[in-house]
Image (tube, rainbow, N blue to C red):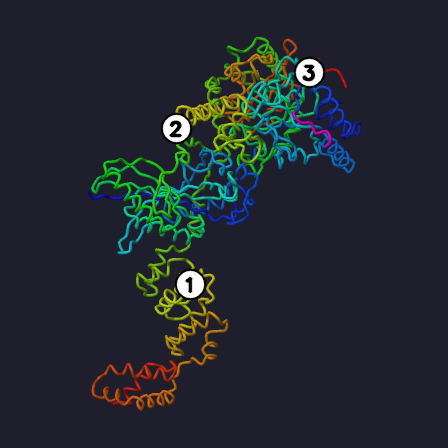
Amino acid sequence: MIKSTVAELSLALAAGDISSVELTQAYLNRIAQYNGELNAFITVCEESALEQAKAADVARAKGDTSSLLGIPLAHKDIFCTEGITTTCGSRMLGNFVSPYNATVVERFSDAGVVMLGKTNMDEFAMGSSNETSFFGAVKNPWNTACVPGGSSGGSAAAVAADLCAMATGTDTGGSIRQPAAFCGITGFKPSYGRVSRWGMIAFASSLDQAGPICKSAEDAALMLNVMAGLDSKDSTSIDKPVEDYTATLNDSLQGLRIGVPKQHFAEGLSSEVEQAIRDALAEYEKMGAIIKEVDLPNSHLSVPAYYVIAPAEASANLSRYDGVRYGYRCENPVDLEDMYKRTRSEGFGEEVKRRIMIGTYALSAGFYDAYYRKAQKIRRLIKVDFSNAFKEVDVIIGPTSPHTAFKLGSKSDPVSMYLEDIYTIAVNLAGLPAISIPAGSANGLPIGMHIVAGDFEEAKVLNVAHQFQKHTDWHRNKPSAMAKEA
Amino acid sequence: MEWETVIGLEVHVQLSTKSKLFSGSSTKFGAEPNTQASIFDLALPGTLPVLNEEALKKAVKFGVAIGAEISKRSVFDRKNYFYPDLPKGYQVSQLDYPTVGKGSLTVTMDDGSERVIGVTRAHMEEDAGKSLHKDYHGMSGIDLNRAGTPLLEIVSEPDLRTAKEAVAYLKKLHRIIRYLDISDAIMAEGSMRCDANVSIRPKGETEFGTRTEIKNINSFRFVEKAINHEVRRQQEVIEDGGRIVQETRLYDADKDETRPMRSKEVANDYRYFPEPDLLPIVIDDDYIAAIKAQLPEMPDSKKIRFIEQYALSDYDADVLVSTREMAEYYEVVAQQSGDAKLAANWVSQDLLGLLNKNNWDIADCPIQPERLAVLIARIKDNTISGKIAKAVFEAMLEETISVDEIIAAKGLKQVTDSGEIEKIVAQVIDNNPDQVQQYKEGKQQVIGFLVGQAMQLSKGKANPAQVNALLREKMQ
């Protein structure tokens, strides 16, 4: 049962085949069995999860038929959860107990979802391997010598290893999609503004977006139905009606125009990944889709532009961690400056400090025009590239990552790590919805396929992803290392 | 050498909104520390700003009132620096696209001359909290009640040439802000604060000299003193062959001097960039027109109207329009009493004197304008004399009964009965044979003395005009 999708669990719960308490206990057992090895969770909330499960069963008995009622979920530890430590993967917030809930947390809670705990992540979501977490690296369930991807590595590993039915993630440059690809699951980043950022700890405010990490596109639709919507507490959330994202999942793809960006099938792409995506495209052709090459001429500029804009915003967003009001404070500061310096030197990890310095530099007097302003110009060009492409095609499909999950500790050079997100970053700069779904396997590791659509075309992305999953079984594959049942 | 002073002012006013610029916390002054700090004001992780539209309205109101350009699209920026009373580590402000652009206001100097002073811009920003250095034994306390209170920073062009002009500009600004009711603008409480940029140059020179910025000036009087001190200091430095260093200086009112701020108190690179948590503010012509339509009559036009409508002197009109409340008070008195000139005298002298003496706002005054109007009407219809009216005025402070009841109860009604007055006049003539003789011999001015005697006998109640006429008649 724990290996089922949310859609299946929803039916089983409704039919009375299983109770939420039983299901929750099963996941808690699974966490107890595998979390030591995977390190996917920073905090497990056994007691409160069982209480919530009990409450869900009671609600169901009283006639509540909410689709996610009683289904166990894990939140990335970037979402503030009232009364529960919210670390953001950092020593800086190692002792931070949030006094309030993020809107995403609130919405799932209102939907009767059971929260199993908080998942591990790269520190402040800065990383593509989950190795920058203060709480230790997360292991990939398919091969524990490999990384799960990042920054939502804990959520992705937890879903892949069936430690939860579904999880939340956040994606600033690929942090939902790349770990989803590495862990062989479904990860969806909605359009910027679709899901409220209130209570989601900021990395780069103009790029951050929350989304579902789960076992199928259908599950992503069910989750997004709960997550999406205007929030008066987030000025950048969008006042657009929320569709029922499950309604169009089964629309036919006959005549669908799929764009394949030539820049995403160039140097650097591993041959296994390329083959898997070509095979997937052939599958779509069988469904009646038309494949067209599209040009994203500025895509080579997306990584450099991103690594100016994101660190610039981060350098300000992380200024609040100063040891004054909450979080880590150094021992025995001699004066204010000493407190600032040591608190931030000791409280932040290397990657976070590197990005704060990059961002501070890019915004400094005399460099602003050369870096920040220029990066914003590139961002606009990238947006234009996509809108031009979407005049010709309905969706754009390519690989999520140039290769499968890499070995822990194998990327010590920050720039090679930054290039991990080469196919996903442009989508954040343009604010578009995009999903990664499993589409193949190489050497026992999953391969992710990336599907992008125009602004607020979440339903289109999910429809295209769901149709693939109806015709293939890649999303049903499970890591053999995690096969042992408790 | 003859020097010319160049001054530009940066004035911060706290916009009087109920809640803060980006959070729902109250902005009330004087609460227990940190009782008005929400999770956003504390900069807890994950919290986000939401613009208070009241603050925007008030900023636009100011811009419209001074005829400034209003930006259809304005943008908030982050101004980055570390300080314990700045919880986010950045202040949200507006750098390149302020809500209010170029405008101007006219100030009138004591000699009646007028100067038009340019306003470069006015932008919205958040106030910081307060650091409390007392009572914490080697540590500092932080009070975040003020953090996030909306400020409007009004920046003038370097058009001011004397400390007096600077004060006149500041007072004019204060008057406009109070008329618009967009801020309490109380300098002593910090709801209006002023920084002055001061430089000097040889008279006739067109290039500006190096300027210093004086911070922390918290009264109109100190603005004048601080600028004058700084001008003298700069002259001395230059005349001694020195050079002015561009720096930030603090005004110390106790020592009446400015001194440089420690370099640590001055951040030099704020790394401004657009605030990604807020969308640009977009407003249209209708929005601006609606605010314009709600503007009250502003002090300059009110003054002109008072001069025309009530035949007042420039001086009286200026005193009466000094606050919107005073002007409104005056108009009630003028209209209900039926004597605008007399009303002007009473309001600008007796009433204002009373308010100043007791340190009252006009709203606290126990004498309502309707009552003062009745008092003036009683002077006009000869029920009481002007002199008796002063006594009634005093009594009105104590009594809640009507003006007529006071007059009746105290027996202050003017005697106009000619039989009554005839008796008094006869008695005065009897009592003062010498003066009567003098009058008859042509010494006309003695009449004043005799009228005074009659008024004394009547305890001030006799109608002096009637007394005067009757005396003359009887002494023919």
Boundaries of the magenta span: A42-47
Look at the image and tell me in which quarter the C terminus of chain B lies: bottom left
Q: Nearer the viewer, residue B346 or B105?
A: B346
Do the numbered discs 1 and 2 sit on residues whose CB atoms are within 8 Å?
no
What number is the disc on residue B355? 1
Residue A139 visible in the displayed image? yes
Along the line of sight, the residue nearer the viewer: B401 or A286 = B401
Q: Secondary structure at mark 1?
A: helix
Tell me which label, 2 or 3, sits earlier in the chain.
Answer: 2
The type of residue carrying mark 1 is Leu
The picture places residue A305, in percent across and down from the top left corner, at 46, 22
Whether residues under marks 2 and 3 lie with C-beta atoms below 8 angstroms apart, the answer is: no
How far, Cα to Cα, is label 1 from label 2? 53 Å
Disc 2 designates what residue? A365
Image point 66% across, 10% down: which residue?
A444
Position of A147 relative to B161 (above/below): above
